[in-house]
Amino acid sequence: MQHQRVLILDFGGQYNQLIARRVRELNVFCDLLPSDMSLKKIKEYNPIGIIFTGGPNSVYDADSPKIDRGVFELGIPVLGICYGCQLMAYTLGGEVQRASTSEYGKAEVTYSSSRLTVDMPANAVCWMSHTDRITRLPEGFKMLAKSQNCPYAAFGDEERKLYGVQFHPEVNHTFKGTVILKNFLYNICGAVGDWTMSNFVSNQIEALKNKIGDKKVLCAMSGGVDSAVAATLIHKAVGDQLTCVFVDHGLLRKYEADEVMSVFKDGLGMNLIKADDGAIFLERLKGVSDPETKRKIIGEQFIRSFEKQAKAIGKVDFLVQGTIYPDVIESGKGKSAVIKSHHNVGGLPSVVDFKEIIEPLRDLFKDEVRKVGFELGLPKNVVMRQPFPGPGLAIRIMGEVTEEKLETLRDSDYILRDEIAKAGLDDKIWQYFTVITNSKTVGVQGDFRTYENVIAIRAVTSVDAMTADWARIPYDVLEKISTRIVNEVKHANRIVYDITSKPPATIEWE
Ligand code: XMP
């Protein structure tokens, strides 16, 4: 069944993915696509509505992105946000002025009644982030909201269903901002709300059944949310035709490998092969302390371990990849400096004999993947699993990785997670773990001098891991964690708390 679709044209603003997530949360499917999409392609996409995002440009810049005027003549409703609304006004003959000062942050707006502003209060706070402003509306438009600095904070041509908002309805700081988006989608575009995760699951299982038929599928299971949800969807569709390979590199957290086996093999009855290669990884990591070298060794050995299993399975028709929508959006964008060489399953296709890749989650944002996971009945510890780096605990041990240090790290990390959960903070902190620093200090335990590892606690809040702030864990919780680690864990006698944000630090220590 084809669902309704909204097209979001990306003009490069910082909140663009957030707009798309908000639209999806309102149960309407949308795609975020480059703003230079041709009019022909826009028509072919057949959206029920179009949203222009914000962007860093001024409509007067010579190389600023423009829009084909024809888009306003398709009879499809358009909502322009920030730069998007200036572009709409400018293209249709209104006037946009360069202001000498920018307006960033909260502003009070007064709304007038319209289909876009139904259920909005007369006055409310919104989030502004712009320099240029509209000073004259194109013909046929009327003002729908104003602020002190913005005579046209929102405007629209109700007949042609063209609307613009200077502020950002997608951010939480805009009071009832989602109501504006909802009004656009439901009152103006005629959305019916057919994008739900239960629909997605049933449609996707049907589609996978048709696509796969009686053929063979192979999936690399990491224990992470994406591969777990992708594999479960495929398992529901084709059962035993799916084989999953789980490479246990021995660098997982306490009980993690057993949990994967118990949920997917024992619980769901999946055809899951575990490659127990911890000893090989540890051997190859002997004497290695450089972070990048560690990452490269682990990434390379991971592929070798997977390859060995794949060879034993033989030719398959499909290889599953846990690609999700942000990866699709990001790929194709410019290259940035390599801070750390990331390890993921992207290198696998070259070592597997297969015909085609399937990516059952490529349309979904992370929060949607999690909802699908719950729909499929996966347990909370799998669905809400924190991000975990491919190279695992190896990059949380500064210096050489040894079995002894791994044990200290696993035990301390387990206590940290246990206490964070007991304090009810597990849903509030984005990622938290312990690190074995490369230093030892003197301590005293039971009248004896000790000379043991300094363990660091790293805990951050973040939205997308691009930036992060250190989490303000209450002192009494930190105290419990610290006391338990030094008392219960071997080879640890001092605990420190990492209070650095990203940037300038990164989330992981290596
Ligand atoms: P950094 O340390 O770069 O981490 O601030 C950002 C996020 O990415 C995770 N991370 C990885 N994830 N493969 C992954 O799939 C990797 O090699 C890798 N290295 C870091 C990290 O845990 C954090 O969530």
Image: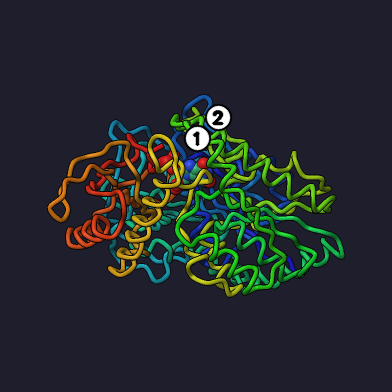
- Side of 451 where 154 appears, left or right: right
Q: Residue at x 77, y 64 (%)?
A: 208
Q: Residues within 10 Å of mark 2 (few under 14, many from 20)?
A: few
Question: Residue lying furthest left in this view?
Answer: 447
How much space separates mark 1 and mark 2, taking CA atoms?
33 Å
Picture quadrant where residue 481 is located: bottom left
- Look at discs 1 and 2 and give the one toward the viewer: 1
Quarter holding the C terminus is top left
Question: Residue lying furthest top in this view?
Answer: 62
- Please determine whether, in this image, residue 261 is positioned above or below residue 153: below
Q: Is residue 83 visible?
A: no
Could you say whether the residue bearing mark 2 is in a helix, strand or loop? loop
Tell me residue 147's x, y (percent): 29, 52
Q: Residues within 10 Å of mark 1 (few under 14, many from 20)?
A: few
Q: Residue at x 73, y 50 (%)?
A: 309
Q: Which residue is mark 2?
A: 335
Could you say whether the residue bearing mark 1 is in a helix, strand or loop? loop
Tell me residue 83's x, y (percent): 46, 41
Point out which mark residue 286 bears: 1
- Side of 393 where 264 appears, left or right: right
Q: Three-letter amino acid code at disc 1?
A: Lys
Tell me which numbered mark, 1 or 2, is placed earlier along the sequence.
Answer: 1
Tell me residue 497's x, y (percent): 24, 47
